[in-house]
Amino acid sequence: ARAMKELWDKFPVILKASSGSQTGVGVVINESEKSLHATVQMIKLLNKNIDLILQEYVKIEYDVRAVVLDGKVIASMKRNVAEGDFRSNASLGATTEEHELTELEKFECENAAKLVNGKLIGVDFMPAKNREKEQPYILEVNSMPGFSGIERSTKDKSVTSEILKTYMNKENWR
C-alpha cells in the first residue's frame, strides 16, 4: 500500500524480484491493484522471504545497456522492446544494436557502477531527450548482466574477450 502511494496509485506498474535472472523472467506488469495483489500473493506463496521491487511503468521503444568494467564503460547497446512485450531483454527476443554513448551518459553509467562498488556491471537506462545536456534515467544496475545481446551488437570487439583479458591479470583479482 505504501509503495503504491509513492507511485501515486498509478497503474500499470512493474513488479520484479530484487535479484534477477539475466533474462527478464520474473518481471511482471500489473494493470490494476487487484492483479498486483494476486501476483504478490502467488509469489509469497512460493517464497515468503523474497524481496520484491515495485516500479513505475514507463512505456518506451528502447533502452540502453552499458557494460562497465573496473570503472570504465567498455561497450553499449540499444535494446529495442521485444515485439508484443514491454521488456527489452535480448534473451526474450528483443533486437539489439550498437549504440554510442555521450560523455554525460558514460559518466552517469560509470558513476552508477561506482555507487554499488561494482567491478563488472550492466547499467540500463533510458536516454534523455537532450542526450548531451540532460542526465539519462537510470533504470537498473545489474551485478550479473548477460552478454549475448551485446556480443551481437558490438561489431569491432568482443566484450567477453575484453572481460577475460582483464581478469586473466591476477592484479585485478581484488
Image: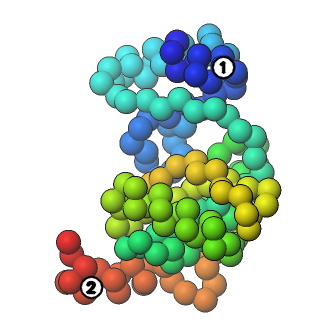
Q: Which residue is pictured at 64% across the width and 28% down the height? A: 13
Q: Which residue is pictured at 52% across the width and 12% down the height? A: 1
Q: Quadrant of residue 11?
A: top right
- Amino acid type of the residue that numbered disc 2 sits on in the rendered structure: Met
The residue pinned by badge 2 equals 168
Residue 133 percent location from the top left of the image: 73, 63
Q: Which residue is pictured at 36% across the width and 61% down the height? A: 118
Label at residue 21: none
Viewer can see residue 165: yes
Q: Is residue 107 above or below residue 170?
A: above
Callout 2–callout 1 Cβ contact below 8 Å: no
Q: How is the image coloured?
A: rainbow
The residue pinned by badge 1 equals 8
Viewer can see residue 146: no
Tell me the quadrant of the picture where the C terminus can be found: bottom left
Q: Earlier in the sequence, mark 2 or mark 1?
A: 1
Q: Quadrant of residue 28?
A: top right
Nearer the observer: mark 2 or 1; the answer is 1
The answer to whether residue 1 is left or right of residue 125 is left
Residue 111 percent location from the top left of the image: 47, 62
The answer to whether residue 165 is left or right of residue 88 is left
SS for dot 2? helix
- Amino acid type of the residue that numbered disc 1 sits on in the rendered structure: Trp
SS for dot 1? loop
In the picture as drawn, the residue positioned furthest to the front comes out as 133
Most foreground residue, 115 or 46: 115
Residue 109 percent location from the top left of the image: 53, 63
Q: Residues within 10 Å of mark 1 (few under 14, many from 20)?
A: few
Residue 41 percent location from the top left of the image: 45, 14
- Number of marks in picture: 2
The CA distance from mark 2 to mark 1 is 49 Å
